[in-house]
Image: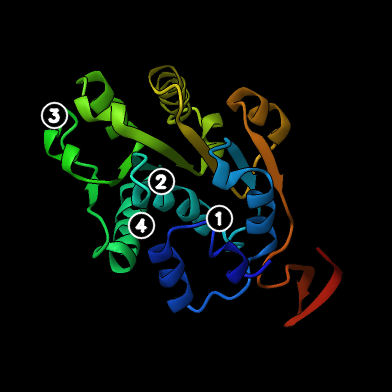
Amino acid sequence: MTLESLKSKIPPDLYEVLKQDGITHLRPSQRKAIQAGLLDGKNLLVCTPTASGKTLIAELAGVSSIMERKGKCIYIVPLKSLATEKYHEFKKKYDKFFRIALSIGDMDASDPYLRDYDLIISTSEKLDSLIRHRADWLKDIKTVVVDEIHLLNDPGRGPTLEILITILRQLLKNVQILGLSATIGNPEELAAWLGAELVMDDWRPVELRKGVYLNGEIEFRYSD
């Protein structure tokens, strides 16, 4: 599937940004996500290897909803460092088109200024705090991206993330939820809980090979 084939399906500004990024063809997981209803507002659980193109899947949905004035996008990540990385990445690409905010700070504030921002990158703990403080702009969210969604199984962060997703689904009846992960042990079960289409693919940009290192040499057993 080529980027050109999406020209009539995504906002013109988004198409131009992706074209300038040098994207000409979509990766397998991106093609599968579009075929599963990504651009139609469907919930998706995307389980593919690292660097296989999951962030672009989130962009296609979240940025489209912003540019088409359907609603805000909130991008949930597990770590402040990752949130900062994503903030700078999106800021570089989309700053002239809409407003982007990083919300990872004070856990005892509703951050009313966020009502003026379109793409909000946050940790699950911070978003949980915003919900508890009844942030009035939450009703304007159209797309929720949950990066590293396999952390639902984490003893520390898992319960907060699970409750967060549950509350968002109750508050936002027409929200699109995209769960992204490279490692999920029970993808079918998780997809069913999210009410999502499951997108799985094993393509990776660099071949993964396994072997045994002994006496300065590696003997490869097989390819994966």
The vertical placement of 126 against 19, above or below, is above
Q: Position of residue 207 (x, y in %)?
A: 73, 71
Residue at position x 14%, y 34% in the image? 111
Discs 4/2, front:
2
Give the quadrant of the C terminus: bottom right
Secondary element under disc 4, as helix, strand or loop, is helix
User: Which residue lies under the disc numbered 4?
Assistant: 86
Q: Residues within 10 Å of mark 2 (few under 14, many from 20)?
A: many
Mark identifier at residue 54: 1
Q: Foreground residue, 11 or 20?
A: 11
Separation of residues labelled 4 and 1 (CA atoms) = 13 Å
Mark identifier at residue 65: 2
Discs 3/1, front:
1
Mark sitting earlier along the chain (4/2): 2
Mark sitting earlier along the chain (2/1): 1
User: Which residue lies under the disc numbered 3?
Assistant: 109
Discs 2/1, front:
2
Dot 4 and dot 3 residues touching (CB under 8 Å): no
